[in-house]
Image (cartoon, helix red, strand yellow):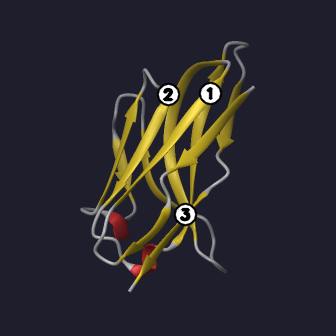
């Protein structure tokens, strides 16, 4: 009924930048909160940043001042601009969204994940 597809991951040197995108598609009436999580090997999945429909944002302390989350409601897309990347930012990054479908149902959807690797 809906799906999220991430893109923009890759390999970058420490200090570099990457921009992740996550596009939602399907029978979507409205997207509520959209967020990025990340999971490093052997660790739990943690919140990186979140953004509400009225663009109120929240960040993990570890990325404040380096990462910026934004969204384009017309394109059903959320972005994560990552600057000053560090090796400890290496993880699989997942986007998630609260989706209201045209049927009136509400679900939390997740993307398949995109790998970000930061070399030292």
The x and y percentages for residue 21 are 47, 45
Numbered mark located on residue 38 in the image: 3
Mark 3, secondary structure of its residue: strand
Nearest to N terminus: mark 2 or mark 1: 1
The x and y percentages for residue 59 are 37, 56
Horizontally, residue 50 falls left or right of residue 14, namely: right
Number of labels in the image equals 3
From what the image shows, is residue 64 above or below residue 74? below
Q: What residue would you read off at disc 2?
A: 76
For the residues bearing labels 3 and 1, Cβ distance under 8 angstroms: no
From what the image shows, is residue 97 above or below residue 36? above
Horizontally, residue 117 falls left or right of residue 5, namely: left
Mark 2, secondary structure of its residue: loop
Q: CA distance from mark 3 to mark 2?
A: 21 Å
Nearest to N terminus: mark 3 or mark 2: 3
User: In the orientation shown, which residue stands out farthest toward the bottom?
Assistant: 120
Numbered mark located on residue 25 in the image: 1
Q: Residue at x 43, y 20 (%)?
A: 74
Nearest to N terminus: mark 3 or mark 1: 1
For the residues bearing labels 2 and 1, Cβ distance under 8 angstroms: yes
Residue density around tag 3, few if under 14, some if 14–19, many if 20 or more, within 10 Å: many
């Amino acid at each position: 009924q809906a799906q999220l597809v991430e893109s923009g991951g890759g390999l970058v040197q420490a200090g570099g930048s990457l921009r992740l995108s996550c596009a939602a598609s399907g029978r979507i009436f409205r997207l509520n909160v959209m967020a990025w999580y990340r999971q490093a090997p052997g660790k739990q999945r943690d919140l990186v940043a979140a953004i509400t429909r009225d663009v109120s944002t929240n960040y993990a302390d570890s990325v404040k001042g380096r990462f910026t989350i934004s969204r384009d409601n017309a394109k059903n897309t959320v972005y994560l601009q990552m600057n000053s990347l560090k090796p400890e930012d290496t993880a699989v990054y997942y986007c998630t969204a609260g989706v209201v479908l045209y049927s009136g149902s509400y679900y939390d959807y997740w993307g398949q994940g995109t790998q970000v690797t930061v070399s030292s």
